Image: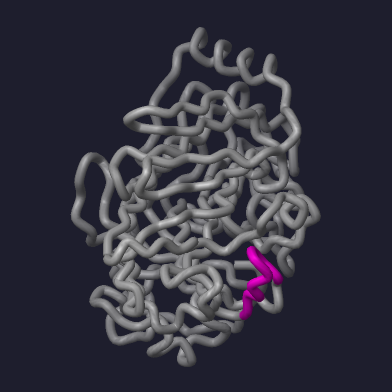
Amino acid sequence: MEKRQKKLSRKQSNEPPKSQFPNRVSLGPRQQSRVLSLSAASMAAEPKILELSNGRITARIASWGATITSLLVPDAHGNVADVVLGFDDLEPYMKGISPYFGCIVGRVANRIKDGKFTLNRAEYSLPINNGPNSLHGGLKGFDKVVWDVVEHKDGECPSITFQYHSKDGEEGYPGDVTVTVMYSLPEATTLRLDMEAIPHDKATPINLAQHTYWNLAGHNSGDILNHLIQIWGKHITPVDENTIPTGEIMPVEGTPFDFTTEHKIGERITDVPGGYDHNYVLDCGDEKNGVKHAAKLRDPSSSRTLNLWTDAPGMQFYTANYVSGITGKGGAVYEKHAGICLETQGFPNAINQPNFPSVVVQPGEKYKHTMLFEFSA
């Protein structure tokens, strides 16, 4: 999701999503002040890469952008491959070479039209970094800062918890916000991500996303066009020529966007100008433990399968359309369609679309967003 693409005509549906972003809980003033003081007291150290392992899968996660730099996953025969695109060390991430490989993006993921919005009668202007739009939090979003490591826990459920304090006015956004993300391995082949954010003094839009590029055959195995995917979304939010949603909710039935049953990613991609870079409305997945089935990704060559579950209302399905000639881990060169992003999220430009689920979080509320990555073979 780095560039613009051509306009696709869309048909209006009569089924816009009515619910607001569901994952908010209220905090008392004492809880708010405690979280703020903890964040203010902590000092951001030099960025580093930490390891999270349970003997079956092993992740390397950097405090720069809370970024997954490596994820080793076995196939049916026990052969392990690194299934995420990235770099061997932190220098390319810190120099801005990475097209959001593996990171947490925010304060607001995806695009905001013209980098402008109005909230509580105040107008806000954001940095423009994607055509005429503001993308993934601006010029220095949450992917380009050092997060504090507040806990690194081994044992039965190993985990790493990162925290970042975003200040009032940072990249144009209102209010102080404390953001916490925890990566954990609750099961043998499951990676869990819990994201939380607490605004302290002003209402603000918050929409965090995890921007890993997946290639289940291995990060250095070429393109993902033969991967098969099923998406539990019967609608998308179609976009204009600047990749901003038009406000419509379009049924996918009978279009190249229909992945309600499993299809090869490359089967109809040439029918979509530029490739897939669209938000799906997650409206038909089974639910379990507060999350719903969002997608199933499968590599036929290794049989590795990723089942993604989330409590977010949408998911950006992006096929690395603008990756070109990037030298990554072990000298692998990543080209167009080298990976696939499954970014669960609030809807793009929701702050300017009143019929989309709201991404505004009030002081005293907590934004919450969970993702479960279940691997099998």
Does any portion of residue 155 appear in the rendered image? Answer: yes
The residue that appears at 66% across and 75% down in the rendered structure is 333
The residue that appears at 61% across and 15% down in the rendered structure is 38
Tell me where the magenta segment starts and ends, as one range.
Answer: 327-335
Q: Is residue 57 left or right of residue 187?
A: right
Does residue 234 belong to the magenta stretch?
A: no
Horizontal and vertical percent for residue 19? 33, 47
Query: Quadrant where the C terminus lies?
Result: bottom left
State which quadrant residue 6 falls in: bottom right
The residue that appears at 70% across and 37% down in the rendered structure is 146
Does residue 331 belong to the magenta stretch?
A: yes
* Residue that protrudes farthest toward the top in the picture: 30
Residue nearer the viewer, 74 or 322:
74
Does any portion of residue 13 appear in the rendered image? Answer: no
Horizontal and vertical percent for residue 34? 56, 11
Q: Is 191 rendered above or below residue 45? A: below
Residue nearer the viewer, 195 or 130:
195
Q: Is residue 263 left or right of residue 65?
A: left
